[in-house]
Image (cartoon, rainbow, N blue to C red):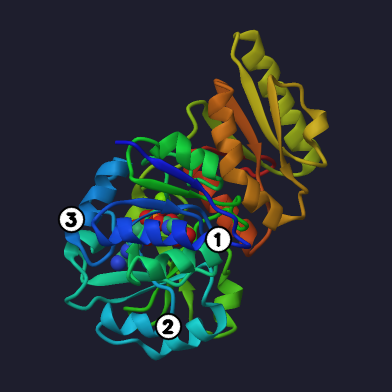
Amino acid sequence: MDTVIARIDPSNPDPEMISRAGGIIRSGGLVAFPTETVYGLGGDALSGDSSRAIYAAKGRPSDNPLIVHIADMKSIGRIVKKVPDEAYALAEKFWPGPLTMIMEKSDEVPYATTGGLDTVAVRFPSDPVAQAFIRAAGGYVAAPSANLSGKPSPTSGKYVVEDMNGRIDMILYGDDSVIGLESTIVDLTGTSPVILRPGYITLEMLRSVLPDVSVDTALLADDDKTPPKAPGMKYRHYAPKGDLVIVEGERPEVIQYITDKLAADASLGKRTGVIASTQTASSYKADVVLDMGDASDHDEIARRLFGLLREMDDEEVDSIYSEAVSGEGVAAAIMNRLLKAAGHNIVVLGDIQA
Ligand code: TXA
Ligand code: MG
C-alpha cells in the first residue's frame, strides 16, 4: 500500500490535509497522527473492521483494547453507558490532555475496539492537529500508539514512517511529541479510581481532584508475574534488541558498576551502550553514550526516552546500561517504561535484597 506522508505545521494545519485524513478514516482507512503524548495510529472507533485493520497494521494481539479519542466533551455520551461523576471532575481539570479514563461502554462501541471488554478507554487529547483530525474523522478515532507491536511508542514522525510506511493510508507528520510518554490510564469502573498505567498526569495530581485514587497493585508488584488490569501492560514492550540493564544507586557507585561492566563486555567483543544523565554522560567509555537529559528534569527525560531506545537499536549495540531515574510523579512513569524495556532487569546497588 502507498502511504501518503503529509507534513503538517501544528501552528497552521492545512485544512485540506486534515479533511483528506478525516475522509480516509470515514471510509474505513488508517491514518497516523501526532498527539501531545506519542503518535497514534487512528481508525474509525465505531467500526469493528477499522479496529481489526489497526491490529493487523501494528501486528498487535487483538485482545489488547484500543483507546477511543474524542475532540470535545459532549461526544462522550454516545460511547459510554453513563459518565461517572469522577469522569466529569477529572475532565474538568485534565482534559484536553494526557489522561485516559475507562468507563462502561455503550452498544455503539464494537467489541473489536475494546478487545472484547464491556469497558472503553476514552481520551480527549490537547494537540491541535489531533483535535482537528478527530473532528474531520467524525469524532471517534480508535488509536493505539503508532509503533509496530513491541517497539517503543513513536515520539517523532520519522519513527512513524519507519514503522508504518506501506502499512497504512496516511501519516500526518507533525512536530515531535511534547510529553513523550503515553497517557496516564485511570479505571473508573470499580469502587474507587485506579491508575492502570502511570504517565504525565501523576498520582498526586489525580488525588488533588479525587483523594481516593490508588495504583493498580500489579504495577506496584514490579514484576512480570502479576497480570495488570490494562491488558496491554502485560505484553513485553519497548524492548531494544540489545540486553538492557537498569542500574540504580548512589551516583559514584552507579558509574563504577557500569564502568566495570562496560570493560567486561568490551573484552568479550560486545558493542556497548549507555543511557546516562547530562551530569554523568562524560564519565562513560562505551561505543554509544546517549544523554537522557538533566537528572532533575524528568519532563526532558520523558520526552527523550523512547527515541533513545530506538537509537540504541539503530546503533546495533549488544548490551545497554541505563541509569535509573529517581523520584515520584513523572519519574515513576519513566521507570515504569524503562523497567518494561529491560524486562525488569534492574540492579539496585547497596541494597542487600538486590
Ligand atoms: O497516550 C496515549 O494513550 C497513546 C496516544 C496515541 O493517545 N495511545 C496509547 O495506546 O498509548 P496503546 O494502545 O498503545 O495503549 C493503550 C493501553 C493498553 O495498555 C490497553 O490495554 C489499555 O490502554 N486499555 C485500553 N482499553 C482498556 C480497557 N477498556 N480496560 C483496560 N485497559 C484498557
Ligand atoms: Mg502502545
Q: In front: mark 1 or mark 3?
A: 1
Dot 3 falls on a residue whose secondary structure is helix
Tell me the CA gap for discs 2 and 1. 22 Å
- Using residue 87 as the reference point, say whether residue 229 is left or right of it: left
The number of callouts visible is 3
Asked where in the image residue 80 lies, by quadrant, the reply is bottom left
Q: In percent of the image, x 37 and y 40: which residue is there? A: 3
Front residue of 329/137: it is 137
Task: Check mark 1 vs ligand 1: CB closer than 8 Å? yes or no.
Answer: no
> Residue type at mark 2?
Met
Disc 2 on helix, strand or loop?
A: helix
Residue visible at 40% across and 71% down in the picture: 135
Residue annotated with mark 1: 13
Q: Measured from the top left, where is residue 268 in percent x and y?
A: 60, 9
Q: Earlier in the sequence, mark 1 or mark 3?
A: 1
Q: Amino acid at mark 1?
A: Pro
Instruction: Say which residue appears at 40% left-offset and 43% top-offset.
Output: 4
Pointers 2 and 1 in contact (CB under 8 A)? no
Quarter of the rendering containing residue 178: bottom right
Reply above or below: 180 against 113.
above
Residue type (three-letter) at the residue carrying disc 3: Asp
Q: CA distance from mark 3 to mark 2?
A: 26 Å
Q: Is residue 107 left or right of residue 263?
A: left
Q: Quadrant of the N terminus?
A: top left
Q: Is residue 2 visible?
A: yes
* Residue at x 54% of width, y 70% of height: 126
Q: Provide the residue designation for mark 2.
A: 73
Q: Mark 3 sits on what residue? A: 49
For label 3, count other residues whose C-alpha is less than 10 Å away and answer few (under 14), some (14-19) or many (20+): some
Residue sitting at the far front: 16
